[in-house]
Amino acid sequence: MIKAFQIISILEGVSLLLILFVSMPLKYIFDMPEANQVIGMAHGILFLVYVVMAILVKSELNWNFKILLIVLACSIIPFGTFWMDRKYLKGKA
């Protein structure tokens, strides 16, 4: 479960960066919303999976509520999931 969460967290972080630095500029600067629709849908699904898996991994790693909130907050901060992976998951899988 932890290894799967690591993979999802990396994919979720990459999808957020793609939205911020690729699809949003394409949409608002070049008037090309198609990329945002595809990447946005993928990011939405990955975000939901990330949240559910974080809640499931909480008990496996004996996280308290504060750590769970930090892990969840990392999903909305650019590069946050990469930091979370190193801080809370490295060496646990």
Image (tube, grey):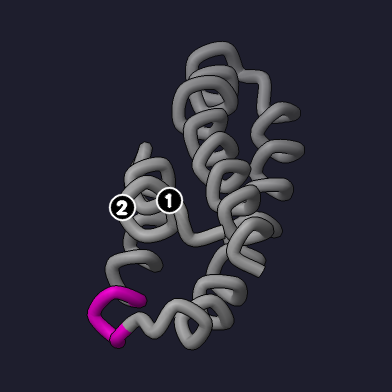
Instruction: Decide: is 56 above or below 17.
Output: below
Instruction: Decide: is 64 above or below 52.
Output: below
Is residue 30 among what the camera can see?
yes
Residue ID at (57%, 53%): 6
Is residue 44 among what the camera can see?
no
Q: CA distance from mark 2 to mark 1?
A: 7 Å
Mark 1 highlights which residue?
A: 90
Examine the structure image and report whether residue 52 is included in the region drawn in magenta.
no
Instruction: Decide: is 86 above or below 22.
Output: below
Can you tell which mark lies on residue 7?
none
Residue ID at (72%, 47%): 42
Residue 66: x %, y % from top left: 23, 80
Q: The N terminus lies in which quarter of the figure? A: bottom right
Under circle 1, the secondary element is: loop
Q: Residue furthest top?
A: 30
Residue ID at (39%, 84%): 62
Q: Amino acid at mark 2?
A: Lys
Mark 2 highlights which residue?
A: 87
Residue 85: x %, y % from top left: 42, 50
Q: How many marks?
A: 2
Residue ID at (74%, 29%): 34
Q: Amino acid at mark 1?
A: Lys
Magenta span dominant secondary structure = helix
Question: Camera-side residue: 23 or 31?
Answer: 23
- Image quadrant assignment for residue 78: top left
Under circle 2, the secondary element is: helix
- Proximity of marks 2 and 1: CB atoms separated by less than 8 Å: yes
Question: Tag 2: Cα neighbours inside 10 Å, few (<14), some, or many (≥20)?
Answer: few
Residue 55: x %, y % from top left: 51, 81
Q: Residue furthest front?
A: 91
Q: Please give left or right for residue 12 compared with residue 73 in the image.
A: right
Residue range of the region highlighted in magenta in the rendering: 64-68
